[in-house]
Amino acid sequence: MKYSSVNFASDPDDSEDGRLPGKGRFRVSEKEACRDLREGKKGYDEKVAKVLARQPEMKEVFTTGGGIPLERLYTPLDIGGLDYCRDLGFPGSYPYTRGVQPTMYRGRFWTMRQYAGFATAAESNARYRYLLEQGQTGLSVAFDLPTQIGYDSDHPMARGEVGKVGVAIDSLADMETLFREIPLGKVSTSMTINAPAAVLLAMYIAVGEKQGVPPSELSGTIQNDILKEYIARGTYIFPPKPSMRLITDIFGFCSDNVPKWNTISISGYHIREAGSTASQEVAFTLADGLAYVQAAVNAGLDPNVFGQRLSFFFNAHNDFLEEVAKFRAARRLWARLMKERMGVSEPKALMLRFHTQTAGSTLTAQQPENNIVRVAIQALASVMGGTQSLHTNSFDEALALPTEKSVGIALKTQQIIAYESGVTSTVDPLAGSYVIESLTSEIERQALEYIDKIEEMGGMLVAIEKGYPQQEIQDAAYQYQKAVESDERVVVGVNRFQIDEDGGGRELLRVDPSVGENQEKALKAMKQGRDNVLVGNRLEAVRAAARDENLNLMPAMIDAVKVYATEGEICGVLREEFGEYRENIVL
Amino acid sequence: MSERRIRVIVAKPGLDGHDRGAKVVARALRDAGMEVIYTGLRQTPESIVETAIQEDADAIGVSILSGAHEHYFSEIIKLLKEKSAEDIIVFGGGVIPEGDIPRLKEMGVGAIFGPGTSTSICIEWLEEEVREKRAKES
């Protein structure tokens, strides 16, 4: 491309009014103009050398948050290897770098989906209805830890934890309360549930039937991603092999019966929260994805079919440019892996659709109001990266669960980006930026390197057994902490620009300590009111299905939850049959 | 005679799976020359206290991000008293509201290090506490 010379001083008389400099001062001669890119760059570099001699830059090496070195300036020279049609293409077309839909946010904004749940089903139900009234467009259920780990509220391991980080669900009775007056045929519901995902999905199907909504009309997502539980999140129950079977049973059952359900949300979010870099987040998440696809293929399922119901979940961290590039790289790499390594041809099974949550680990307990700004920047990155749905964190989450007010601000942040910022009016607006395209390619390259290494080890299950991803993540987390403590990385309000604050009087959400007791009482009463012989029979049917790998576990589970067998009882049977996972401690 | 190295149990009680902080602190304490035993996830107060006594630990560092801190700290301190091991220092970190800290300290928790605390502050505090504790014992 040729750059023409520029002449700002169009009228020679302008120079005589005293405000503008003399005639021709702004005239750029042919000699000065950038006629050849390489030559121009050389000239620029010489100029930089002179500037540096006078004033060095603030750092010797600039890097992204994930440690990718950043050049001072990116030009077309940095993306010389990029082939538009091969590497970017068009939105809605392979390799989906620019987005999975042709019109993206011009057609419809992302789903604004705030993860919420605490205390009892009744209190969480009230919060969901508040969020729906506030304009939220989908639900996202947070379960308490006992529910996530397959214990009822009266189990000794549940003591002190009931209703704390999410809602306590013991049986279908709680689930009915949770969705009271929420039409399951109209909202889509995401449930953050992994090891016992099959049980909670069974309950959701049962509640739907009671509301008169057939399974084929239900839409939503279960997280159902056990591998990242072993790697980073920690709410596993069973060992990998039976866990993978539960997952493929769900894939198979939903393909036939709940076709609009996203059967898994393959999650990099927690991997990143545990301390990984952006490239590691992409790498380990996609490697997990490949492991699920392989397991399902081994179970006789067609990746062209179940591949359409796979969804992903990523983190939106602070480094804006790197994050935008990360989402684009993940999309491109997944499409390529599915096509080239898994032989998938169905376009919908090549598309990486994802949910995003802003990075909880970047929230500071110091000057918590600053977190509103962090969240806004992170949320913007996810939108520039083409997310399908988004949770924005509340500013007080380094201190406690969010209050109604702070959740409101978080949701408004999304609405401001959607309705006021203008970035949604054109698809993939940062494409073609030299730095964004360079970073997109670099993250894809680094992630693929990890994925190949994991494949060489024998796949993700073997790598997890060896503690490989765990170790990589922990090393990155420790490096980060050291960088903050040495002031190499600045965290505003934490290691620079601190102020004295007294946070004792802050308004925080408190979970009523009687929640556990009340939940236990309700559970006891429920057990007395149900047909316990029938429950016993249905639990034995679950056991029989667990023992026969040729059977799908889902129908037996649905039968069991319908007669109010509890989650703890069903998981108890599975614990007896499958055993429990023991953590491979890596330090 | 060279002084015995400080021995610390870093513990994750209950069902909370957030172990980034616990592991970072464990590594930092180890790099500061302490002997660190990290329990892994899903420990009961009983198993934590037992490990601390068996290992003759100077301190137990407890990490909780699930909101169940009152329950676990009170259980651990109660058990230490029952086993006449209340000389073992108890400290912790995680997502713990500032308003809860006075109550935890009344219980006998030595210090709570919230998000954003430099590990060097935690290390200095622990070294000082152990020095005082050992001075009392000798």
Image (cartoon, helix red, strand yellow):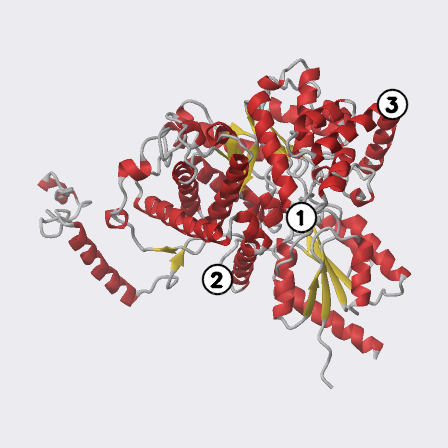
In the picture of the structure, the residue carrying the numbered disc 2 is: A488
Task: Give the answer, above or below, for where A507 lies relative to B11.
Answer: above
Label 3–label 1 contact, CB within 8 A: no
Q: Position of residue A428 (x, y in %)?
A: 37, 34
**Residue drawn at 83 percent across, 28 percent down:** A536
Which amino acid type is marked by label 2? Glu
Q: Quarter of the image containing the C terminus of chain A?
A: bottom right
The local secondary structure at tag 2 comes to loop
Q: Is residue A314 visible?
A: no
Q: Position of residue A379 (x, y in %)?
A: 49, 38
Q: Is residue A580 left or right of residue A460?
A: right
Q: Residues within 10 Å of mark 1 (few under 14, many from 20)?
A: many
Dot 1: chain letter: B
Label 1 – label 2 distance at C-alpha: 29 Å
Which amino acid type is marked by label 1? Gly
Q: Which mark sits nearer the N-terminus, 2 or 3?
A: 2
Q: Residues within 10 Å of mark 3 (few under 14, many from 20)?
A: few
Residues at marks 3 and 1 on the same chain: no
In the picture of the structure, the residue carrying the numbered disc 1 is: B17
Which amino acid type is marked by label 3? Gly
Q: Nearer the viewer, residue A338 or A276?
A: A338
Label at residue A529: 3
Q: Position of residue A585 (x, y in %)?
A: 65, 57
Q: Residues within 10 Å of mark 2 (few under 14, many from 20)?
A: few
